[in-house]
Amino acid sequence: MLRGELVGLRAKHESDTPILDAELHDDVVNDVRSGWRPWRPVSPGAEASRFRVSEPADDRAHFAVVELTSGTLVGEAQLAGIDPHNRTALVGLALRPAWRGKGLGTDIVRVLCHYAFVVLGLHSVRLGTLADNHGMIKAAERAGFTREGVGREVAWIMGEHVDSVYYGMLASEWPA
């Protein structure tokens, strides 16, 4: 398990999937906002669940996020689009509703950065979020990311185009 101050990142367990499906996927508005794709119903236990346990792959690392004190599953996190040639990846996370607004996002981002820079030896990580996702923006900035740009009206979210913001961090900026 990778450990931060508040959270740990571990491999997903089969028992995590129904919880994440019920609290993250079935929350239609937040699922659309976090995934930037149309929502579709997924039956419990379906192969289509993006939270199901999957085999390791070179281009992604998916984690279950647990609160360290209690061991409670609080969400999921990932490095996606891992590019070994350019040594880059994208950071992503989703928290169960009861665990949002508690400062866990910053810790999750820091643990993902430690994994990216120290374990994988990547050169840079990127993070993209909707411009009105203040929690994710705060987490990125508190973790030391630099705002790199705005995508104007690039996401179609629940009937309207919404801006996104992009952040990045280089390995040389990571405080080991």
Image (cartoon, rainbow, N blue to C red):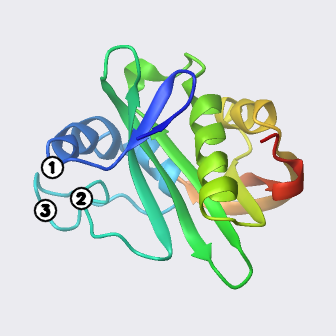
Give the label, 2 or 3, closer to the camera: 2
Residues at marks 2 and 3 touching, judged by CB atoms closer than 8 Å: no
* Image location of residue 10, percent across then percent down: 37, 44
Label 2 and label 3: CA atoms lie apart by 11 Å
The C terminus sits in image quarter: top right
Q: Quick check: 22 left or right of 85?
A: left
Q: Residue at x 32, y 15 (%)?
A: 70
In the picture of the structure, the residue carrying the numbered disc 3 is 46
Q: Amino acid at mark 2?
A: Val
Label 3 and label 1: CA atoms lie apart by 12 Å
Residues at marks 2 and 1 touching, judged by CB atoms closer than 8 Å: yes
Q: Amino acid at mark 3?
A: Ala
Q: Residues within 10 Å of mark 3 (few under 14, many from 20)?
A: few
Q: Is label 3 in a helix, a strand or a loop?
A: loop
- In depth, the one of 17 and 37 nearer the eye is 17
In the picture of the structure, the residue carrying the numbered disc 1 is 14
In the picture of the structure, the residue carrying the numbered disc 2 is 53
Q: Amino acid at mark 1?
A: Glu
